[in-house]
Amino acid sequence: MTESATQGLVDTGRFSHLFPTTSKQYAAGIPNSVVDYVIVFRYAKNPPKNTSREAYASQVSQDFESLGSKLASSGLLYQVKQGAEDNTLLILVHCPWSVLKKHLFRSRIHDFLIGVRVEDVDESGRRDSGHAESKTDENELPRHDLTEAERLRLVYDMITLPVNDGGANVSPDTDKFVDSIFALHNDELNKSWIQSWNKKWLIHETDLQLIRDHLGEKVAMYFAFLQNYTLALAVPAVMGVIAHFTLKNTFNIFYGIAMMIWSVVYLELWQRKERNLAVKWGVRNFSRHDKQHPGFTGDTVVRDAVTGEMVPYCAPWRLFMRRVLTLPGVAIAAAGLSVVVGFVFMVEVFLHEYYTGPFHQFLHYAPTIGYVLLIPTMSGFYTKWVKVLNDWENHKTEAGWEYSYTQKIFVANFLVGYLSLFITAYVYIPFGEHLLPYLDVFNIQHNHQKVGTERLKAQLMYFIITGQTVGFFTEMIVPRIKAFILPKVMTYFNKGKSDKKISDSNSTELDAKTLEAKDVMTEAENKFMQKVYDEVAMEEYNIYTDYVEMVIQFGYVSVFSTIWPLTALCCLINNMIEIRGDAIKVCKYTRRPTPRRAESIGPWLGNMQTLAWLSSITSASFAYLYRSTTDIHSPWTPIFTIMAIMANEHVFIVIQAIVRYAIQLVPTWADIVARQQEFKLKKTWLDRTANEEQFVAKDIGSKEEASNNELDMFWMEHQKPESELEAAKATIRSSFKSD
């Protein structure tokens, strides 16, 4: 894009890293040039079977032409660059301010109508802060009004939304050869962000605001949750240390109830924190906005009953049947994953507890290696499979798609994280001795002793210490190695291509001044395109994996802390590193997350509440099963265990009700601010409608305004206030006179 084409489009002060307006800025190495998004257009090098190369080339060309037409019809500007691979094209998209302004205004009005924003909005789409605003040029963005994340979110909507919603309808779900769409990293901000966090222990509100302005509310909400949860772990960490050194038997019902109370209190307090952040960030009631999922396809088009717009429609019974038909697929995948987890567990138990034959000292580590290699691989297959099923379910809204996908992911990680612990606690420890006769039948050498709760404790310690260490290695060390190797490979691969471009540019017959400018632009462009190639090679950021890691960890703390009280302390230490590790991962090792809005952590809160309820079952059952006086083989043990579970579950319900009621008695900052904003908005509209004195304080007693109402005229003609009052007082005095 030429210099003249970029001038006057945006506020270069706030978005200087995105939009250079002069050749000097371009030559200075501005990170993101004029690019809002990069669309990766990738096709197969070889045509499918029974398709000629000419026919396939024609199909790819037609699809690319259609994509370009859709972008242009939405007012988006784009340039096409060759990707690092021959079968990849990179479409660099930019949205002019004149186009973005219309979409911004439409978005603000829509937010106002559904209650996301309660501030008034003027005709330019700006929020009315209650005072006169200075006039600005139509091509200048108000510095205080539009964040970088909001701009990128709006442009992403313009690219992906259906045509009837003002978008270009371009996405990997609707376009066969569109591989992905992503925004480029702001390297300068990322660098300062990481350096700042390395110097502090806690994330401040200003840090969260920076994340929100840079990456959107959804990512900012995750970091807010991660810090809030980490700080909350200090309470069970202290309780765990005390219990570890004072209780002979940590399977104590009172310690279990204390952990149960903590989990309930934390979840209720977090919901208050969510509401405060939602109001502060201007996304309260955002969940009311059911944004259509890009992959949704309807059988026909109908008129929306509320808005009157034409929207795709799919019969409810079809959607229901799709949900039902995916259940067997999810169940089979979950069962397969359970079999793998169970198999690894049985091999581990056999080699550790029974086997004493050849190579015992080496085979001792085989289950750990198998777990590290096999479980993540199978979990990856499960994740990809359920995503395919989730897409096939044809969810109408993004919220519906996210909820369904979250639950499927939670099921997989629940099985991987907890299944072997449940098998050990409720099957292996009570009935492990029954395996000995089978070992004798097969003449397997063994030296087995009775298994106790130490086995369960060692297993939980493995998940907490070894599991989280392996997770840190795969999240931080492996990406660092890849980041070191891949750029060198890509640089070598693209060296010939870049040298050829520079050679062609230098051979152009231009005067000295033009040639110098051309060389500068080419050098900067090559540097910029290398950045694009590097980020195309990165993996997409998956916030679901970060959330599920913390949710499963919350389960270890709330559900299984009575097994090993130091669980919370280890998780606290891990999370202090995790906060910074996730920040580095987002900035350096994954593509930049597409900014999205969120007023809560979504379905994960419900999953955590389920785990808190599950803690009432495990704490009671462990306390009864593993006390010294319990005969675990008695026929009465299952009955008494169920009775203990039911009693503790009722205690959980009572605790939850009391805590929820007590917390709700204290009004939140968000409630007060929301009422203030709503009052201010109503007052503003009242002032607009008419003069307040004329509208409210009218002379309702005048006969002129009541002349058209016979009943009012009758009352006014017979209105004698003094005589009515005297008569009433006389009646009252007479009622107190004695007969």
Image (cartoon, rainbow, N blue to C red):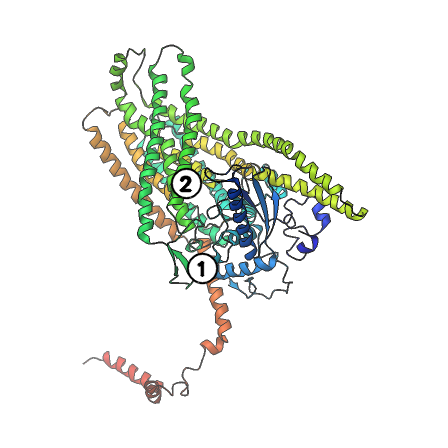
Residue 691, horizontal then vertical, whole percent: 50, 76
**Residue at left 55%, top 66%?**
123
Mark number displayed over residue 115 = 1
Residue 738, horizontal then vertical, whole percent: 20, 79
Q: Would you say 40 lies left or right of 316 here?
A: right
- Front in this rendered view, residue 19 or 186: 19
The correct choice, above or below, for 698 with respect to 404 in the image is below
Dot 1 or dot 2, earlier in sequence = 1
The image quadrant that residue 90 belongs to is top right
Q: CA distance from mark 1 to mark 2?
A: 32 Å
Q: Would you say 138 lies left or right of 225 here?
A: right
The correct choice, above or below, for 643 with respect to 62 in the image is above
Return the residue found at the far right.
512
- Tell me the residue that label 2 is attached to: 387
Q: Amino acid at mark 1?
A: Gly
Q: Amino acid at mark 2?
A: Lys
Q: Nearer the viewer, mark 1 or mark 2?
A: 2
Residue 224, horizontal then vertical, whole percent: 49, 44
Q: Is residue 605 visible?
A: no
Mark number displayed over residue 206 = none
Tag 1 near tag 2, CB within 8 Å: no
- Front in this rendered view, residue 694 or 110: 110
* Quadrant position of the C terminus in the picture: bottom left
- Front in this rendered view, residue 214 or 22: 22
Q: Would you say 709 lies left or right of 573 here?
A: left
